[in-house]
Image (cartoon, grey):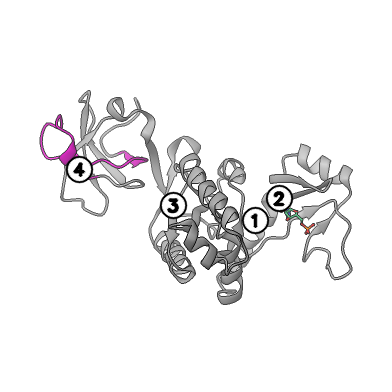
Amino acid sequence: YQSVKPGCHLRAHFSYAPSLDPLVPGAGLLLQHGDIVQVTECSGHRYWRGFLLQEPTRECYIPSPQLVGDHYEVVVERHLPYVQPIILTGSLKNQVQDHFYQERPEKFASCVPHTTRAPRESEMPAYDYHFVRRDTMQAMINSELFIEVGEFNKNLYGTTEAAVRLIAQRERKHCILDSCSAIPKLHAAKIYPLVFLTGAKSWRQLVEMRHGEIQEFEARELFDKDTELEKEYSKYYHAIVRESTLEGVFSKVLETIEKYSQDPVWIPACEW
Ligand code: 5GP
């Protein structure tokens, strides 16, 4: 944080309630996870000053990085020349994905992955998958063309950066992905996805929202997994969407996508 000067922007990866902080020297700024703060004063040891972008006239004290550790991220504003990919995670990711493909085909699309598996009779090359030989795929992996790769039933599967760009830049649609492991590779390629956790507020709701296709014990497991994901990837999530109905999940995700499509995009300064 030594490079931070007045005028710099920080994203808070924590929440801060000044009313609960007995040490804050004066009026403190209420911070919610994900807020962007413009720094106005950063010479103090324990407290700096700044304001929230949505409230530029309210300049207040904020805890300094010395107090909150690396829970701030220095960010810069950029306008992106592509439509941001969407990464869906959590126990309702398939329901959300299917709903968006069906209901909003003008806005969302899937990209075509590669696989070493043989095509099935009903499948069309370059539509369902790019079917390639294992040595070809391995050479492509070595050349770092993939943003994520996995193995299933002794076959390799993966998504290339080019496949994502085709949707994001040429078709100008949100490409839906489902793997958080792609995030670092996407960032390295200067592609900044919007990342969501989709789930329920309780495991009982999950049974209902998955229309009884899962048993009670599976719903409990999935629910616990969502809670783990929430902790592990909290820094990456643009929204943690845990609602009591599927419709609620769909509209919250859409609402967040729309909000981010209008606002400028704040990108980690270290990656730019
Ligand atoms: P299928 O061979 O039936 O089309 O897919 C079988 C499994 O391969 C899927 O359930 C999924 O786990 C995995 N798979 C399909 N596409 C991809 C992909 O793009 N990347 C990765 N890592 N796995 C995939």
Are the residues flagged by discs 3 and 1 in contact, CB closer than 8 Å?
Answer: no
Quarter of image, ligand 1: bottom right
Q: Which residue is mark 3?
A: 238
Mark 4, Cα crowd under 10 Å, few <14 / some 14-19 / many 20+, is many
Residue 84 visible? The answer is yes
Are the residues flagged by discs 2 and 1 in contact, CB closer than 8 Å?
Answer: yes
Q: Amino acid at mark 2?
A: Thr
The tag earlier along the polypeptide, 4 or 3, is 4
Q: Main secondary structure of the magenta part?
A: loop
Query: Seen from this angle, which residue lies furthest left?
Result: 26
Residue 13, magenta (yes or no):
yes
- Nearer the observer: mark 3 or 1; the answer is 3
Query: Seen from this angle, which residue lies furthest bottom?
Result: 103
The tag earlier along the polypeptide, 2 or 4, is 4
The tag earlier along the polypeptide, 3 or 1, is 1
The tag earlier along the polypeptide, 2 or 3, is 2
For image coordinates 61% across by 49% down, the residue present is: 179
Residue 70, magenta (yes or no):
no
Question: What is the span of residues highlighted in magenta in the rendered image?
Answer: 8-30
Q: Which residue is mark 1?
A: 164
On the image, the x and y values in percent for residue 23 come to 15, 29
Q: Can you say which quadrant of the picture contains the N terminus?
A: top left
Q: Amino acid at mark 3?
A: His
Mark 1, Cα crowd under 10 Å, few <14 / some 14-19 / many 20+, is many
Q: Which residue is mark 2?
A: 160
Mark 3, Cα crowd under 10 Å, few <14 / some 14-19 / many 20+, is some
Callout 1 secondary element: helix
